[in-house]
Amino acid sequence: MSEILPVNPFFTDTTVIPDEYFCDRKQETSAIISEIVNGRNLVLKAPRRIGKSSLIKHVFNQAEINDNYHTLYVDIYGTKNASDFKAELNRCFLNAPFARDSKIRKRVESYIKSIQIDLGSYSESGFSLPKIGLGNIHAAVFSIDEIFDWIDKAEKPGIVVFDEFQQIQDYPEKMAGILRSYIQQSRNTKFIFCGSSRHMLNSMFSNYNQPFYNSASSFDLDIISLDAYTEFVREVFGKYGKIIDSETIEFVYYLFSGNTYLMQEVMKTAFSQTPSPGKADENTLRRSILSMIEKKDADYRDLINRLNSKKERNTLYCIAGEGIATGLTSSAMMKRYDLDNASSVQNALENLCSEKFNIAVKVAKGVYMLQDRLFELWIAYRGGYLQYKMESPKARFEKERALAKSLPEIIPPRKS
Ligand SMILES: Nc1ncnc2c1ncn2[C@@H]1O[C@H](COP(=O)(O)OP(=O)(O)OP(=O)(O)O)[C@@H](O)[C@H]1O
Ligand SMILES: [Mg+2]
């Protein structure tokens, strides 16, 4: 029987990707499995949209894990306190395949009955509330303690993933301390902590004074290599009788600095615009990029309108224009981008990098970039210089990679 192909094989709206359409990550998949099998907890770090969550779900989908472990994936993005955490943990626990266990079911059923009576909905004709399905319960049925205990004592060992784990640092409660004791008591469960705030995760796990100090191995997820991505895209296009050159893929890869989500989004559009049989060339890709930029118009306008002042906007335009911006307070730069004075630029930079806006990031001393490459391209498009941005993306990519690897100079001790 011939394989049923998905309408579009580039998945961007989900983190659950069928193995055939999941690009590479072979080495990372086996490294994570090996850490878990060898009994270690893990901290998985990477910038936004590189593929942390998808990788974890891919790992869960591998037979070695799927057949032998109970897995629980909890995304705590958007939770604000310990009670939100507990509710989300419950929701994920009750939706996990192993929650079909009869003891868990019984407990949930009696809980539903209890809240129905509490709500005063019991009448002579019986319960009047609509029947709540097991998957729809968002309330906290079990205590955190009970959930960890159940997983730890189950017949299979457990793996619990907390995605966007840095979020607990914003809770009013001292959640790190509470969780640490559960994690230390677990005998049969391993934990994976994921997140995009490298700085925050490093301080949680590498700082001697923090509850999680040294409790997990560190795993930095890099971008997918150009070779692996090229092979993947060509193969996927090929399955549908479509062609795309390596150079065209390379152009997209460099332009987006290997950001998985943005590359997949461009490929998704380009794929849909290529007939079968047919070829996607650089023009097809440029059109796809343009349509992505246009789709984000309203969002990016909003973002700019949220900035308080002209000095913030001009500092933003300066970083976008330069791509990798250095010497922002030099007189030449201030003149070119109509910036007032060094201290107002410094203020604007602080705001743009603040948690509130999170638009720019300081990549090294005095060096700034925008967080979102598509936003940078949108500014270039609106400013009429998009063509210039597209001219030599490789040089820009290489400069960015070199910066990421650079280390401030280490001064050797004085010889006596
Ligand atoms: N190896 C891969 N092959 C194909 N598509 C992938 C791969 N990894 C990630 N993606 C796609 O890239 C996008 C971003 O991935 P994902 O959400 O896993 O990243 P993330 O690092 O968890 O992002 P965030 O920081 O926003 O949580 C998703 O749309 C996903 O479908
Ligand atoms: Mg994620």
Image (cartoon, helix red, strand yellow):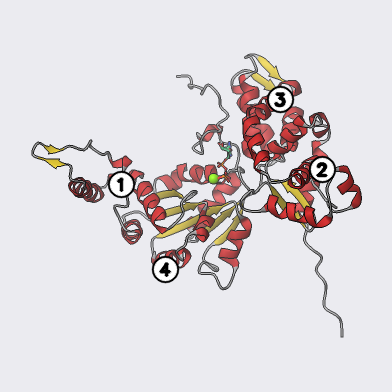
Quarter of the displayed picture in which ligand 1 can be seen: top right
State which mark lies toward you, 4 or 2.
Answer: 2
In this rendering, would 396 be left or right of 235?
right
Vertical side of 186 occupied by 258: above or below:
above
Q: Tell me where residue 301 sits by quadrant.
A: top right
The disc labelled 1 sits on which kind of residue? Ala
Question: Where is residue 260 drawn, in percent x and y?
Answer: 63, 39
- Give me the residue at 56% from left, 73% from top: 209
Q: How many marks?
A: 4
| SS state under label 1 | helix
| Mark number displayed over residue 181 | 4
Q: Earlier in the sequence, mark 3 or mark 1?
A: 1
Q: Which residue is mark 3?
A: 285
Q: Which residue is mark 1?
A: 99
Q: CA distance from mark 4 to mark 1?
A: 24 Å
Per the rendering, the mark at residue 322 is 2
**Front of the two marks 2 and 1:** 2
Say if mark 3 contacts mark 2, CB within 8 Å: no
Ranked by sequence position, the earlier of labels 4 and 1 is 1
- Label 3 to label 2: alpha-carbon separation: 23 Å
First in sequence: mark 4 or mark 2?
4
Badge 4 amino acid: Ser
